Image (cartoon, rainbow, N blue to C red):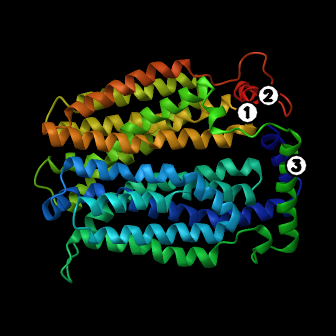
């Protein structure tokens, strides 16, 4: 755990390094947050046009759910190859490419004419966006010392919360636009997609692939920054460990448990993301703008709850209990949403959002505490990839249920049950290595040991 202890001292004792770190954060973090917001909007905006596409194109509930989920299949399949190419060609070129292709694909959604077009473009959107999140994380590893990366990632992830808040009102306003023979939903796709294309031009001129390319850093600052990052890399290289393969990771039961838990959490999050606007529409004769503003309410409540839970879990340390509590809140909210009318269902989902969004943030300290620092990045990528497949399963299942039964009630029951099961399973998850396994540069944690033996 050398990075987290010595790096702050090095920075504090080296004003040139501290100044360089500050400049890097000011230069790249605001841009990455904006990129994440635009990314999220292009990913989830179909939730606000579902009824419009059904009316204009005949895309039913099952097709909508399947198409919404296909994004995550494309994303999962191409995430690793995309990240490998980023390391080869450089972050500036590859992140610009990612933004351009996802912007073009999102724009083309305006011209779909049937279910097949919808499926193809949703899959291609996932392919286009693949590598964006790990690409940004990789960028941080080349520009910031270890102790600063965690803070930078937390700020970057705030883009998701901000996007959840603004996606509804923004999409509602854009849906009011008409003209040139295009419907409001088509204009929404065009404007939000072309915004990504326009932003990629700025990314091209603003980002640099390596610190030594940055004209906004002095030569002294570049040397201090690169020197510190190289020093940390030499220390990691000195602590030799077998590079884990997917097969190795899959042999650790704790890692598989982490994957299962995160998958359960993501199921509920993406079910709410893609189906909440439809639930809101049933509350009454609401305009698209009203639906958009209502859609922001659960996410606003969940952001407040996430910070409250994080504060409490920091004071009263028993991470599994906090995750379990959040999952049970999500389960109760999802169950209650089946017991009343549309307005009561909306209130219940607001309550559930407190649980499933808090569970998502409370979950990550568990695997981070268990894993050896040298394999943590690979394992977290695996957990994230498998968990995000919940983004396929949830909308596809909900769409099938509504198409075949006329109701998503069965899906809500399923989410409630899944959250309860996850709340029980989380107590089997370890937050620390096994007793007697020292965490040092030469002694790996249980996961790392298992990887070494399996090799």
> Is any part of residue 181 visible from this angle?
yes
Residue at x 61% of width, y 67% of height? 94
Give the Cα distance between marks 3 and 1. Answer: 17 Å
Query: How far across and how far down the image is residue 365, in percent?
Result: 61, 33
Circle 3 crowding by C-alpha within 10 Å: few under 14, some 14–19, many from 20: few
First in sequence: mark 3 or mark 1? 3
Q: Nearer the viewer, mark 3 or mark 2?
A: 3
- Above or below, 284 against 17 in this view is above
Q: Secondary structure at mark 3?
A: helix
Front in this rendered view, residue 175 or 151: 175
Identify residue for label 3: 234
Residue at x 45% of width, y 71% of height? 196
First in sequence: mark 2 or mark 1? 1
- The image quarter in which residue 139 lies: bottom right
- Above or below, 78 against 261 in this view is below
Identify residue for label 2: 439
Q: Which mark is residue 372?
A: 1
Residue at x 36% of width, y 58% of height? 122
- Above or below, 355 against 47 in this view is above
């Amino acid at each position: 755990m050398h990075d987290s202890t010595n790096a702050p001292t090095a920075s504090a004792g080296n004003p040139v390094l501290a100044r360089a770190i500050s400049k890097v954060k000011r230069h790249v973090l605001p841009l990455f947050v904006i990129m994440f917001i635009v990314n999220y909007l292009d990913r989830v905006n179909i939730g606000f046009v579902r009824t419009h596409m059904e009316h204009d194109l005949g895309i039913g509930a099952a097709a909508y759910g399947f198409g919404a989920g296909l994004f995550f299949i494309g994303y999962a399949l191409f995430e690793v190859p995309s990240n490998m190419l980023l390391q080869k060609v450089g972050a500036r070129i590859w992140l610009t490419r990612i933004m351009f292709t996802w912007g073009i694909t999102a724009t083309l959604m305006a011209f779909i004419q049937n279910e097949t077009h919808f499926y193809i473009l949703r899959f291609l959107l996932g392919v286009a966006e693949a590598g964006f999140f790990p690409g940004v994380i990789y960028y941080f590893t080349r520009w910031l010392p270890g102790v600063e990366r965690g803070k930078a990632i937390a700020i970057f992830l705030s883009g998701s919360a901000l996007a959840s808040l603004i996606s509804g009102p923004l999409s509602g306003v854009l849906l009011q636009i008409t003209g040139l023979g295009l419907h409001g939903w088509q204009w929404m796709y065009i404007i939000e997609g072309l915004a990504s294309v326009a932003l990629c031009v700025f990314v091209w001129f603003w980002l640099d692939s390596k610190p030594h390319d940055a004209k906004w850093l002095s030569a002294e600052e570049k040397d201090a920054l690169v020197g510190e990052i190289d020093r940390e890399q030499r220390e990691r290289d000195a602590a030799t460990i077998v590079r884990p393969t997917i097969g190795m990771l899959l042999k650790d039961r704790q890692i598989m448990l982490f994957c299962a838990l995160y998958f359960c959490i993501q199921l509920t999050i993406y079910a709410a993301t893609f189906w909440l606007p439809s639930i809101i529409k049933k509350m009454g004769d609401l305009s698209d703008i009203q639906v958009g503003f209502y859609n922001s309410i659960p996410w606003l409540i969940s952001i407040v709850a996430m910070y409250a839970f994080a504060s409490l879990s920091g004071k009263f340390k028993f991470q599994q209990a906090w995750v379990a509590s959040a999952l049970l809140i999500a389960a109760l909210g999802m169950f209650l949403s089946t017991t009343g009318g549309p307005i009561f269902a909306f209130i219940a989902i607001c309550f559930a959002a407190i649980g499933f969004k808090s569970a998502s943030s409370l979950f990550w300290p568990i695997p981070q505490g268990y894993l050896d620092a040298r394999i943590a990045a690979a394992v977290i990528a695996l957990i994230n990839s498998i968990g995000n497949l919940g983004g396929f399963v949830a909308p596809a299942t909900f769409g099938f249920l509504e198409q075949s039964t006329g109701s998503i009630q069965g899906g809500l029951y399923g989410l409630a049950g899944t959250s309860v099961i996850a709340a029980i399973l989380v107590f089997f998850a370890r937050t620390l290595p096994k007793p007697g396994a020292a965490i040092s540069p030469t002694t790996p944690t249980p996961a790392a040991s298992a990887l070494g033996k399996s090799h």
